[in-house]
Amino acid sequence: MENVRRYRALASLCRQQAAYRPLQNWELLGQAEHFEHLAEVELKAHFDACNVQSDEGAARPATWETPVAA
C-alpha cells in the first residue's frame, strides 16, 4: 500500500508541474497517467492477494439471487 501512496503522490506532482510548464504539459500529464495506472495495478494485486488468503479457509459465499417479477 505504500507504493500506491508513492505513485499517487508522483502523479499529483506531475499534474502540478504540468500547470506551470506549458511546453512540457503533455509529457507531464502522460507521466501522471502512467503513475495512476501503476497505482491501480498495485491496488489490484494487493486486493487479489487479500482475497486469496481469505478464500483458502472459508467456504464459498452464497450467491445473491435477483428476484424476478412474475
Image: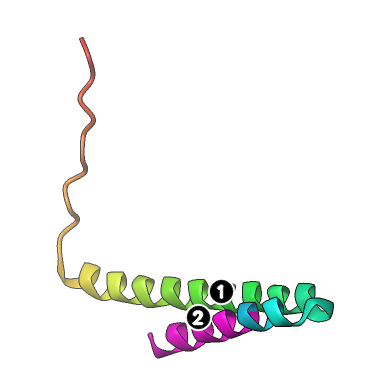
Give the CA distance from mark 2 to mark 1. Answer: 6 Å
Of the residues shown, which amino acid type is indicated by label 2? Arg
Is 18 on the left or on the right of 42, as rendered? right
Q: Main secondary structure of the magenta part?
A: helix
Mark 1, Cα crowd under 10 Å, few <14 / some 14-19 / many 20+, is some
Q: Amino acid at mark 1?
A: Glu
* Bounds of the magenta segment: 1-14
What residue is drawn where x is 43% and y is 85%? 5
- Measuring 76% from the left and 82% from the top, which residue is drawn there? 21
Residue 63 falls in which quadrant of the image?
A: top left
Local SS, label 2: helix
**Badge 1 element:** helix
> Horizontally, is 11 left or right of 46 in the view?
right
Q: Disc 2, disc 1: CB below 8 Å?
A: yes
Q: x, y (%) of residue 42?
A: 47, 78
> Could you tell me which quadrant the C terminus lies in?
top left
Residue carrying label 2: 8
